[in-house]
Structure formats: structure tokens, C-alpha cells
Image (spheres, rainbow, N blue to C red):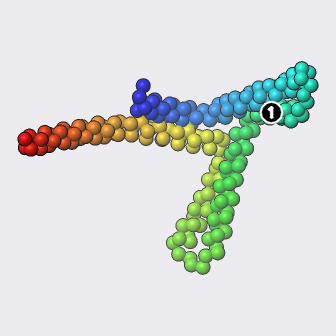
Amino acid sequence: MNNKKINLIGSLLFVIIGLFVFLNPDVIVKFISYFIGGVLIALGLYKTINYYIQDKNLGIVNQNELGFGVTMIVLGILLVCLAGTIEFLTRVMIGGWLIVSGISRIANTFYTTVRDSKFYALLIVGFILICGGLYTIIDSNLPFKILGLFMIIYGVIDFVSYFVYKDAFVTDKKEEIKEAELIEENKEDTSKSKK
């Protein structure tokens, strides 16, 4: 399978995953939380068991390994148990960042001395950022819906560009072949004229 077909399959997968993330963001958040939590628990168990095996068989005591293992188990359990809270915290962090950016932008506009169209544009952008931040906090899964939407848009653009550039590459190859044929004809003509 060549690179072009792999890119085509990749763009289709991006659209499918993007649709799933856009339509079911809560399932995605829970899946990611459960997956990462499971991996952390498995790593923690491995490190903890490895600590006890090394202690019993070799007499090597590595407290860092035990501490790392227990920490990973606790973090994994937290991720699994608090999957819904993680989505909420993500919304609060992104929404809070937008609100702070909007307030900062509004505050900075009042330091300008000229009250022209740029002043009012910055003021409006600040208010839009504040409203966007509040909406992000209130509407559940909005950041993940936006992520899904971006994935869909990227996949569609990549898919369309595959067909647009495929024709361009074919045209370029045909032109290269014609140029090569002309060069060969010129070489033959020059060699005949020298004889």
C-alpha cells in the first residue's frame, strides 16, 4: 500500500473518530480516563510487585520503586473513579482561561488613549472571550465537541486534497515524460547533425 492510500485511509479515520468525538464526547472522556487509569494501575502493580520480588529474592530495597508503584496505583484509581469530574475540570480550566483572557483584554483596552475603531474592536473581542468562557463552563463537553469538529474538518480537507493533488501529480508526471522525450529527441537530432 503506497503513501497516498495510507493518507486517504488516515483522513477517513480522522473523520470517523471526529464524528464519534463530536457526537459522544462524554463516552470519549470516560474511555480515555478508564484507559489511562488502567495503564497507570497496571504500571503501579508492576512496580510494586517488582519491588517485593527484588526485596525477597535479591535483598535489594528500592524505596523509589515502591513509592512510584503506589503513586501510580492511586492516580489510576482516581482517574477511573473520577472520569466525569475530569470532563468538568477540563471545561472549568478552558472556560476560566477564556474569561481571564477576556478580562485582561478589556483591561488593556482602557490603557489606550485613543478611542477609535481598534479600541471598540478589542473591547468587543474581550466581551466575546468572556461569554465564550462562560458558555464553555456551562455547556458540558463543549471543548471535546470542538475537538471533534476540528478533526472532522481536518479529515475532510485531507480527503479532498488527496483527489485534488492526485490529479496534479499525474499532470506533473505527464509533463516530465514529455520533457524527457523532447530532450531525448534533441539529443538524437544533435548527434545526427554532427555525423
Q: Is residue 16 above or below residue 135?
A: above
Q: Position of residue 80 (x, y in %)?
A: 76, 30
Residue in view at x 67 percent, y 51 percent = 95
Residue in view at x 74 percent, y 27 percent = 38
The residue to which callout 1 is attached is 72
Q: Is residue 140 left or right of residue 66?
A: left
Q: Is residue 105 left or right of residue 171?
A: right
Q: Is residue 19 visible?
A: no
> Most extreme residue toward the front, as rendered?
195
Q: Position of residue 41 (x, y in %)?
A: 78, 28
Q: Is residue 141 above or below residue 3?
A: below
> Most extreme residue toward the top, as rendered?
57
Q: Is residue 140 visible?
A: yes
Q: How many marks?
A: 1
- Residue 169 appears in which quarter of the rendering? top left
Residue in view at x 43 percent, y 32 percent = 3
Q: Position of residue 27 (x, y in %)?
A: 65, 31
Q: Is residue 42 left or right of residue 108?
A: right
Q: Is residue 149 left or right of residue 173?
A: right
Q: Nearer the viewer, residue 4 or 183?
A: 183
- Residue 123 appears in which quarter of the rendering? bottom right
Q: Is residue 46 above or below residue 128?
A: above
The C terminus, quarter of image: top left
What type is the residue that disc 1 sits on? Met
Q: Nearer the viewer, residue 168 or 87?
A: 168
> Most extreme residue toward the bottom, as rendered?
113
Q: Position of residue 46 (x, y in %)?
A: 80, 25
The N terminus, quarter of image: top left
Residue in view at x 57 percent, y 43 percent = 146
Q: Provide the secondary structure element on which disc 1 rests.
A: helix
Report crowding for label 1: few under 14, some 14 to 19, many 20 or more residues within 10 A (C-alpha). many
